[in-house]
Image (cartoon, helix red, strand yellow):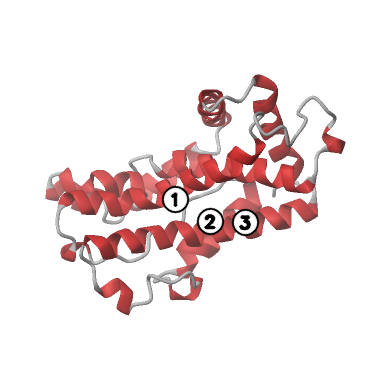
Amino acid sequence: MLAIGNPRLFAAVLVGWIISVILHEFAHGVVAYWGGDYTIKERGGLTLNPLQYIDPVFSLILPVVVLFLGGIPLPGGVTYIRRDLLRSNFWDTAVSLAGPLMNFMLFIACALPLHPHFQWVDTKASPQSWSDAQIFLASMAFLQLVAVILNLVPVPPLDGFQAIAPYLPEDLRLKVTTPPLSNLLFFVYFMIIWQSGIWVAIILIFAMLLKLMGFGAQDIGFFLQAHSLTFG
């Protein structure tokens, strides 16, 4: 089980992660409604109430449990969409990408206040001088981008696979989304993301993106250390 670095911060990040999962699912629903699935409004899919989800276990509870066990922001299950009502393959793909896009927007929203341009945080100072709010935002930014990366891997039932599914041959799509193969693929994926090598690659992507946004090496170190302070 995960060693919690700061129980108060961990609780705050856990709540923040639950909210981000809800917003992720909400984004799927909104784009589906725009794309032609009028039934999602009738089913309560355009609210921020987690109880309205078609599968609260896989959409909310499982991601939270996995985060608690290993600090991995596992993407939640997608809100049920009537894809047969969507107007085109474009909308089908847009619905799938809406969730990761929401996570990416949350990453930007959490990272920008910490930008060196605003001089809100002194990354050269000792971690003891950082406020809980600064550490919370940095840790949430890291989790959001990790969620984007993990969710875009084309493994069913993740959004990365759903985004390309409309363009795959129907027999192949049915084969990889039907047990036992679908369960095996996700199990292998789940095992792989626990390997340290994967996290090195994720951190490199995270650092590269922050650098493109104008963050320096010390700033990037602050984000990673803030996450460590939260999760231990």
- Picture coordinates of residue 54, whole percent (x, y): 39, 71
First reached walking from the N terminus: tag 1 or tag 2: 2
* Residue pictured at 19% horizontal, 53% vertical: 174
* Residue pictured at 53% horizontal, 41% vertical: 108
132 up-or-down from 62: above or below: above
Q: Which residue is mark 2?
A: 20
- Between residue 25 and residue 130, name the one nearer to us: 130
Q: Secondary structure at mark 2?
A: helix
Q: Which residue is mark 1?
A: 102
Instruction: Say what amino acid the circle numbered 2 marks.
Output: Ser
Task: Kindly give the residue lying farthest to the top in the view shown.
Answer: 217
208 up-or-down from 48: above or below: above
Give yes or no for contact between labels 1 and 2 (Cβ–Cβ under 8 Å).
yes
Q: Is residue 107 visible?
A: yes
Give yes or no for contact between labels 2 and 3 (Cβ–Cβ under 8 Å).
yes
Give yes or no for contact between labels 1 and 3 (Cβ–Cβ under 8 Å).
no
Task: Kindly give the residue lying farthest to the bottom in the view shown.
Answer: 42
Alpha-carbon span between mark 1 and mark 3? 14 Å
Q: Which residue is mark 3?
A: 16
